[in-house]
Amino acid sequence: MHAVILTGPEITAAVADHRLRITPFDLDQVNPNSYNVRLGPTLMTYTSPVLDACDRNATTSIEIDESGFVLQPGELYLGHTLEQVGSDQFVPLLFGRSSVGRLGLFVEITAPIGDLGFHGQWTLMLSPIRPLRVYPGMKIAQIMFFVAAGAVDLYSGKYQTATGPQASRSWWENRPVVVS
């Protein structure tokens, strides 16, 4: 079986017949084989200098206004897509847009694959090489959609129906194991 990626016209058709949900949907954001998503107005950062994979980590939120916000190198910012995106039939993959990458911004560090059945705003892991001003509503990433093959087990996990940036919930699954 070969990987099958949806073309722009098929993305539009899949939104129209509800095989794919993108809310809000704008035809101007459809690319030849992806859909551009925009940066939502809220950023989140961790407040502790040391993060713990087995514990909840404290965060603070930042609201970006129309004048923008300057991201600083060495800091991880959790942002979110303005759009809610999801499908029970297509596997989404999110990548930074090349125009944003050319400004030195990593948009998705290690987790570009979405799950079948996830519906919500995507959390973006933003890390700049240089100070970079970003704005709410700017096109920041693109999502491609692949056809799934085989039996489907829909996502029902801890980030389902997410709105706004979501801090890591790794502590749900990474509790320390006592070794005797």
Image (cartoon, rainbow, N blue to C red):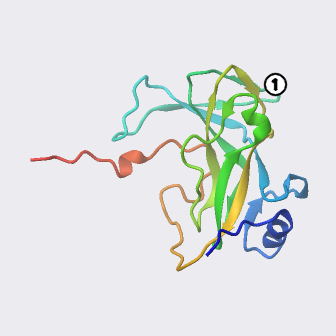
Q: Position of residue 90 (x, y in %)?
A: 66, 69
Q: Residues within 10 Å of mark 1 (few under 14, many from 20)?
A: few
Which residue is situated farthest in the right direction here?
A: 28
Q: Which residue is mark 1?
A: 67
Which residue is situated farthest in the front direction here?
A: 2
Depth order, front residue of 46/148? 148
Q: Residue at x 52, y 66 (%)?
A: 155
Q: Position of residue 67 (x, y in %)?
A: 81, 24
Q: What quarter of the picture does the N terminus occupy?
A: bottom right
Q: Residue at x 76, y 74 (%)?
A: 18
Q: Quadrant of residue 68?
A: top right
Q: Position of residue 177 (x, y in %)?
A: 21, 48
Where disc 1 sits, the SS reads loop
**Amino acid type assigned to the residue bearing label 1 in the image:** Ser
Q: Quadrant of residue 21?
A: bottom right
Can residue 136 be seen in the rendering of this structure?
Answer: no
Depth order, front residue of 6/63? 6
Q: Residue at x 80, y 57 (%)?
A: 24
Looking at the image, residue 174 lies above or below residue 155: above
Q: Residue at x 72, y 38 (%)?
A: 41
Q: Position of residue 58 (x, y in %)?
A: 45, 32
Can residue 27 be seen in the rendering of this structure?
Answer: yes
Looking at the image, residue 114 lies above or below residue 98: below
